Image (cartoon, helix red, strand yellow):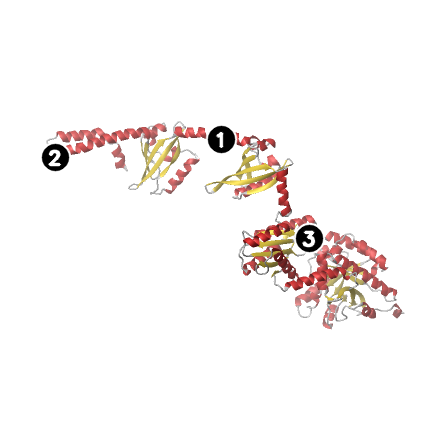
Amino acid sequence: MNKLIKSTEIDMDNIFQLYHTLKSHPLDDTSRKLVEDLGRILVPYIHTQQHLLRSLSHVMCVLMLDEDGTILYSDDYFANLASYESSQVQNNNFEQFLTNADDNDIFRNYWREKNEDEVFDGDLSFIGKKQVPFWMRTIMVPLSDEASYMMFGMDITSQKQEEAKQLERAHRDYSRTVQSLVNLVFKVERRGSDDFGYTLFEGKLAEDIGLTTDTVQNRSLEDIFGKSKALFYQTKYERGFQGEVLSYKHCYQDRYFYTTLSPVMQGSKIAEVIGSSIEITSYEEAEHRIEHMASHDPLTDLPNRGKLQADLPTLLKKHEKVTLMFCNLDRFKYINDAMGYIAGDQVIKLMAKRIESILPKGDMLYRLGGDEFMVCLLNDHSSEDIAKLGQSVLREISNPIRIMGKQIFITARIGVARHPTDCSRADELIGCANVAMHYCKQNGRHNFLFYTPDMNQYHDYRITIEGDLREAISRNELHLNYQPKVNVKTGFISGMEALVRWNHPEKGFISPGEFIPLAEETGLITQVDEWVLKEACRQNQEWIEDGYAPERVAVNVSANEIQRTDFADKVRRILDETGLAPQFLEIEVTENSVMQNTDQCIRTMQDLKALGVSLSIDDFGTGYSSLSYLRKFPIHYLKIDQAFIKGVLHDPSDSEIVKVMIQLAEAFKLEVIAEGVENEEVLHFLIENGCDYYQGYYFSKPLPPEEMEKSLVKKQSYS
């Protein structure tokens, strides 16, 4: 490096003097000829170098840096631009002359990496002694033989100033242009992790609504729009800064707008988000919005049933394989009944998001209405992949939900139909998925099944049964059996439970486990419950009038009934119509049913108790009631579910649970009824542990009225 610097400082006059000294020195002919040859080569070269250096000094600077950036050599060109002497520039670090302009960042990255084979070529901004910036077109060349760099620069300050003027003129032209736009354009910058602001807000529409760049700059979203709308816009802008191009509708000053956001990239980062808005309050834009609403569910904004029916034929032609997954939420009606439709809507929206979150890209989700969703798989999924996805949907749906201060759980059933494996037409494919979904209920809720042709038989049967059930009451096909309730200590009958049965004229006996859930699903349970209640009261009153000792008859009531505000009035009316005294009627409700819409249930039960009707909790131990609520229920009996009773002799946990239930009832001053007692050993267990009553095949199966009548005692027998 030093040799190179010294070579640039050699006095050309000394070279000439040395040449003339050699020339005038006595030499032999050979030496003289060599000197003359040297002169012919050297003198023009030196003159050329002198002219070149003088020329370069007018148009370009030369600096030499070591590997740390220290300036080892600087010509006058650079020093003059920086308003320094050359000696003041040398031995200083090169970076101290650079400004903080963004343009210099590329050079700083180059300098940090110091790739010895890479040449830097770019425009750099410098600052001089007088704090006046200047620009140079710069080339930085690594010297391979030494750890140093040669820098060549050309002053382009006037060019940059002219560019700045042109940019300013362009900016003014741009401002005039955007201000003349009919619609609204704006730019959003990120000011913090969750803070955004506007750097531009222009257009005639902006002026019309009173928001322009001057009015929105340096103001927060909340200051401009208020807290609620600011949160809405903040959510949209956050998505924009995550790289998403999105469009949305919104309202401001009772006017509706349609806005599109587009992120602007700078390198690998999003520098800003540009937005444009048009007003859609006009008829044309409103018409477009109506069309969207007609094909989409307003609650979830998912495409609806009509959209599915319109889309599916096209999808079947476009894709070789299409799979439909018909998803139905279990017992969703009870959420609406217990918590109201606002809570129900929140659950539906959450379920839509949960299902969408795990769908493969390119597959689609529709909301058919109510608690039904349809997943349309367009990719070539194998049966194993479809099954895995279905189980994932079930798991996602079943995750706990916290709503209105309560934690609830939702399950679902999914039926799957595949094109062209199961059917070829769009309407058939939907029908097959529907059949598979309903067939899941036969195999238990929260299930996933592929469609098979034999499911059609069950589906047809179910539709037939539903239609027949609607006419079963008017045709007198329903009847009641009665199962005695026995006093554990005395062995005498102490009441009975009315159990509905259905003898179909063609299909024969149909199990309550089959038609009661169907009645609940279709809403027929209200009619069935009313018929059972009225018939049980009528029959019991008839026995009393025939001279039999009065016994209390227990009637099961569905969750739907006990939650109705007019249920107590219905019971009062039926008692009046049948003439049965209230003390001879007992209403049984399941533990789960009273835990839905609990406050209304308590009010209804209090009204029933005020009538003189007895109340019992059925299937106790299978639900999720808490002791705090149990204390509030105005009940007389706890009925322990038979699932626990049957295990008391061989399952220690069941026996301990039953003991605790009996003790709990005693603590609450309630009497206990054990269901499903089938042998003497179980009865002895109940006697030993203080149970009050029992029901079961050990004493009697449910009996038709004429058989039950034989077990009743005539009043005359007491005389």
Q: Quadrant of residue 51?
A: top left
Quadrant containing the C terminus is bottom right
Residue 420, located in which quarter of the rendered image?
bottom right
Q: Nearer the viewer's eye, disc 2 or disc 1?
A: 1
Which is nearer the N-term, disc 2 or disc 1?
Answer: 2
Q: Nearer the viewer, residue 86 or 221?
A: 221
SS assignment at label 1: helix
Which residue of the protein is positioned furthest toward the bottom in this rendering?
Answer: 680
- Secondary element under disc 2, as helix, strand or loop, is helix
Earlier residue among tags 3 and 2: 2
Separation of residues labelled 1 and 3 (CA atoms): 59 Å
Q: Residue at x 72, y 72 (%)?
A: 681
Looking at the rendered structure, which numbered label has been put on residue 171?
Answer: 1
| Label 2: few (<14), some (14–19) or many (≥20) C-alpha neighbours in 10 Å | few
Judge left or right: residue 42 versus residue 518.
left
Which callout, 1 or 3, points at the residue further toward the start of the chain? Answer: 1
Q: Return the mark for residue 95.
A: none
Q: What label sits on residue 335 in the rendered view?
A: 3
Q: Which element is circle 3 on?
A: helix
User: Is any part of residue 669 visible from this angle?
Assistant: no
Q: Which residue is mark 2?
A: 31
**How far is disc 3 from disc 2 in space, using C-alphas?**
116 Å
x, y percentage for residue 359? 56, 53
Q: Disc 1 marks which amino acid?
A: His
| Distance of label 2 from label 1 (alpha carbons) | 73 Å
Residue 358 vs 442, above or below: the answer is above
